[in-house]
Structures are given as structure tokens and as C-alpha cells.
Image (cartoon, rainbow, N blue to C red):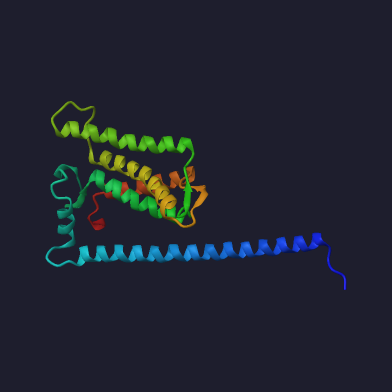
Amino acid sequence: MSHPPPDEIVDLARAQIAARRTAARASDAVAAAWHDRRWGFVFLLLLSALLLTFILWPGATLERKLFAAVHGLVAQKHLVFLGERPLPLCARNLGIYSSFLLSLSYLWARGRSRAAALPTRPLLVVLGLGILTMAFDGVNSVLEDTGRTYLYAPRNDLRMISGALFGIALTPIILLVFNQALRAEPDPERPVLDWRDLGGLLVLNGLFVALAHSGLALLY
């Protein structure tokens, strides 16, 4: 009975080792994905419980609870009205928080949930301009509120637009940090934002700002 040459034995051993490693990596990937889904479910469950507790806690309407959450922090003239009813958040905060939620949902739907790479430098510059826009408009608004010389008359639509630009800039930063720090299997080759994403975010948030300032009571 003839034995295979040593070279064939070595090649066969290498092939078997490579097959085992591939199977182990696949098993690890499945385990990591399940680990992410499990903790994602726990996070959503806790968040839902907190929101339901806030909404269903007896003694006040949801509207009054939302006003109480920011009472004393918002000047009345900064509120956005739908019909005759003011929204609980000021225009700038409404822009920031709504933009963050809309932008995060959009990027998640676009498959960026595991992205762990920075956007291109030109995109980072654009995001930085969004942050500076809110800072500039905020300082101008504070100057007007405190009776000092200001550059232009502050308006709630400008407050909300600058807040939305800040929210758009903040979202990929938070997503990047989250994925790099907590994801078991982040994608280091996929950027958290590209130019197409930015265009979609600007359109989506622009529509929301327009609806918020439409004054339609039905939207409340």
C-alpha cells in the first residue's frame, strides 16, 4: 500500500486547519450577532419601560409632563406653535432632538448600524460647519435675549434649522463612538456617513422643520 507524498500530507493538513479556522470564525460571528441582538433587545426593553412609565404615570397629562421636564429652561418666545398649542420643547431643542432621532433612524435603515469608520475629510468639514452654525445662531440669540447688540433678529425657524444641523452633525459622531466602543463586530471599512446619506438627512430634516413651522393644529 503506497502512502501519499509528504507534500500532499502537508497540504491536506493545512486545508483541514484552514477549514476549522473558517468554521470557528463563522461560529464566532454568529455568537457575536446573537450577543448584539440580545443586548439590543434588553436596551429597547428598558427604554420602552422608561418611556411607558413617563407616559402612563398618573396625575398629569403627557403634555404637562413634557412641559415640566423643561420648565424654566425655555423662554416662551422660543416655543413653536401648532395651531394655538405650543410644543413643550423650544425651537432649537426641537431641532436637535428630532434631528438626532430622524438621522439615527435613517442611517440605521441605510445599513450603517455597524459602521465604524470616519467620513471623508470634506464631510467632516461640512459637519463641523453645522455645529458652528448652531453655535453662532445661539450666541446671537443670547445677545438679543440679554439686551446686548446682536447681528440679526433671531427667529424660531432659524433656531430650529441650526438645531437640526447640529443634530445631523452629532448623529454620526455618536454612532461611530457607539460602534467602536460597544459593537462586538463593527465594520471598520464602512464609514458612518457619505455624501448620499448627508443629502438624504438634509431633505428628511428639512421636511420635518417645514412641518413643525406649518402651524397646522392637526400635527400636534
Image point (47%, 43%), residue name: 118
Q: Where's residue 124, x and y in %?
A: 43, 37
Q: Residue furthest right?
A: 1
For the residue pair 25 and 122, the one nearer the viewer reads as 25
In the picture, the quarter occupied by the C terminus is bottom left
Q: Where's residue 7, x and y in %?
A: 80, 59
- The answer to whether residue 40 is above or below residue 182 is below
For the residue pair 44 and 72, the one nearer the viewer reads as 44
116 left or right, relative to 150: right
Q: Where's residue 41, x and y in %?
A: 38, 66
130 left or right, relative to 220: right
Work out whether residue 81 can be spotted. Answer: no
Work out whether residue 2 can be spotted. Answer: yes
For the residue pair 150 and 215, the one nearer the viewer reads as 150
Q: Where's residue 53, x and y in %?
A: 22, 66
155 left or right, relative to 191: left
- The answer to whether residue 85 is above or below residue 132 is below
Q: Quadrant of residue 40?
A: bottom left
In the picture, the quarter occupied by the N terminus is bottom right
Image point (17%, 66%), residue name: 57
So how many labels did they put on this image? Answer: 0
